[in-house]
Image (spheres, helix red, strand yellow):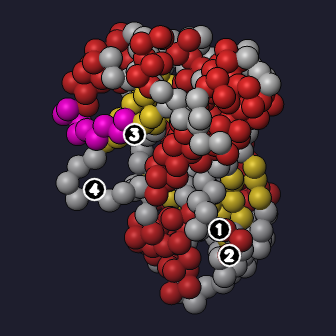
Amino acid sequence: MNLRALSEHLGLSQTTVSRALNGYPEVSVRTRQRVSEAAQQMGYRPNHAARGLATGKAGAIAVVMRTAAGQSADPHYGEFLSGVGEAAMSLGYDILLSPVTRETEEATFRRLAQSGQVDGILLSSPFISDHRITLLDELNIPYMVHGRDGARSKLYPFLDIDNKGAFFEAARLLIGLGHRKIGFINGLGNLNFANDRALGVMDALAENNIEVDPALITNGEMTDEYGYRITAKMLDRANAPTAILCASLFIALGAVRAIYDRNLKIGSDVSLLAHDDVIPYLKPENFRVPLATTRSSIRAAGVRAMQRLVAGIDAPTTDGEVWPVDLIVRESIGPASQG
């Protein structure tokens, strides 16, 4: 199956099919989807060598991933990469995954930009005041950021969810149920998404004249173990929280165990609400007490980030895109206990 045969099958010009496969914005979403589905059904794969000679493009995108000895894999990132891969396949692109350490990261960006092996770079989970975005601007290579750097004033292409707004609404919901002692178990404090979530919680507390208790606001790796340890510590305080917000479902898994270990009931003794990245094997509705969540699919974000990056190779943009977040109310939250 080649481009000409695929075009004849669809009754479209080869130019239209090529542009649809490469995510050009001037091709309608309906046509891009139709072409993508036909390409997969008929086993079409682009000839990268021919395309490279004709267009000067490599047909590949680099994803730079920080790693270190002993560092555990992040299931959130794995799900994001699944979305990136799904889009890459439909667009006819390959993914070059480049593992780096903090010390080798800048050199890797420079090497990738100068090598001609990739057409663009995808950066995920930016830090506050992230120098890597400034570096990508200097290297003059197409890029897309999954997340935002809130300290940056210069425009740059990004895709993010409304983390601040989501956790403002989540905290305000709990406050509306009478909760005044709210624990917040957040992600790493140097990541911008975690900072935005903390700002949302703080704004909700300030709006209701609730004093912030620093002992109830924590940052760390978003794991079951972290959720258990911090929840246990909070609940063993004399002034324990009546509600807990978790930055991920993995944190919530540990929080649930700590609550049950203390013979407390979720939804009555302690309300629990977490962010759901829509991980297929970890569904909040399947918790023993169905879990209230803020929800946005990180896999869908991977698909969209890749689509925008590929489109930006030929039509550069500095536009940001922010997705709203759903707030799903389930049985894990209830009125504040009076005990």
Closer to the camera, 75 or 287? Answer: 75
Q: Mark 3 points at which residue?
A: 190
Circle 3: is it few (<14), some (14-19), or many (20+) Cα within 10 Å?
Answer: some
Give the Cα distance between marks 2 and 4. 29 Å
Q: Name the residue under label 4.
A: 71
Q: Which residue is drawn at 77% across and 58% down?
A: 328
Closer to the camera, 279 or 237? Answer: 279
Asked if the magenta segment contains residue 101, the reply would be yes
Q: Residue 283 carries which label?
A: 1
Q: Is residue 148 visible?
A: no
Above or below 250: residue 50: above
Above or below 304: residue 18: above
- Secondary structure category for the residue under label 1: loop
Query: Are the residues tagged 1 and 2 within 8 Å (C-beta)?
Result: yes
Query: Are the residues tagged 2 and 4 within 8 Å (C-beta)?
Result: no
Percent x, y for residue 38?
71, 39
Give the Cα distance between marks 1 and 4. 25 Å
2 vs 3, front mark: 2
Q: Which amino acid does label 3 sit on?
A: Asn
Report the magenta residues as a range: 96-104
- Secondary structure category for the residue under label 3: loop
Q: Which residue is drawn at 66% across and 82% down?
A: 288
Asked if the magenta segment contains residue 158, the reply would be no
